[in-house]
Amino acid sequence: MRMRILTQRALRFHGKDAFIAHLPSSVKVFDIGCGNRSPQRTKELRSDIYYVGLDVGDYFQNVASLKYADEYRTTSSENFVSEISKEHLNFDAVISSHNLEHCSDQYGVLRAMSGALRPGGQMYLAFPCAESVNFPSRVGTLRFSDDPSHQLPLVWQDTIGHLSHFGMRVVFSRKRYRPILPFLLGMALEPVSALFRTVMPLGFTWAFWGFESVIWAEKI
């Protein structure tokens, strides 16, 4: 996994791994929607971080990954906002990577996440762009509806506006994030992706299509 982490960090200057790498030392991080072995991925990159993960279930987790978490909690989708809200002003950083599109109360979650940050705290958001509702269907998710657990696509300008209303200042944003090298590799591999109707590894297909919206923000 460590080689994959370092590769992703090098390929995506504003991806999740780059965000984690740039955080100050010994910060307290709230990873909201922390599936796909995110505890292990985060702590292997930054062992100094105090890591708290929250999710509505053990989504593609394993015992080895969960051992990396300093705290790990699960809750129901109905109580998701209230569980986040309990952590008011308690964190230096919040990560929400492909979490909001699974939430029924998206802006309630965004408000609670913003409230969990201390002044000067930093937030990483990633979610499918609204345009993905019209992308071709592929195994691994390229069209928004490929994942049946997706709720509604986030409206870009509304999301930016809500962040401002919740006391956040956007420091980096891309409605359709297309880092140059993954984009070029995705373009080269697109005929294979289209032929087999599956996304290519390391997010190359996502980069080519601009599937992912990415925002870095800071609590004022």
Image (tube, rainbow, N blue to C red):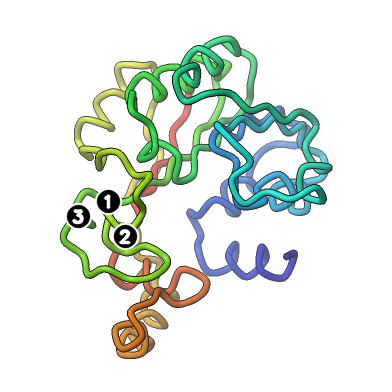
- In the shown orientation, is residue 69 left or right of residue 217? right
What whole-number distance in Å separates the C-alpha atoms at marks 3 and 2? 10 Å
Instruction: Write down the residue under mark 1.
Output: 129
Q: Amino acid at mark 2?
A: Phe
Quarter holding the C terminus is: top left
- 10 Å crowding of disc 1: few (<14), some (14-19), many (20+): many
Instruction: Write down the residue under mark 2.
Output: 211
Instruction: Residue 220: tell me if it is visible.
Output: no
Instruction: Write down the residue under mark 3.
Output: 133
Q: Amino acid at mark 1?
A: Cys
Instruction: Residue 129: tell me if it is visible.
Output: yes
What whole-number distance in Å separates the C-alpha atoms at marks 2 and 1? 6 Å
Asked if labels 1 and 2 touch by Cβ distance under 8 angstroms, the answer is: yes
Quarter holding the N terminus is: bottom right
Q: Tell me if residue 194 comes above or below residue 33 in the rendering.
A: below
Q: Closest to the observer: 51 or 13?
A: 51
Q: Amino acid at mark 3?
A: Val
Q: Closest to the observer: 132 or 150?
A: 150
Dot 2 or dot 1, earlier in sequence? 1
Report the mark closest to the observer, 3 or 2: 3
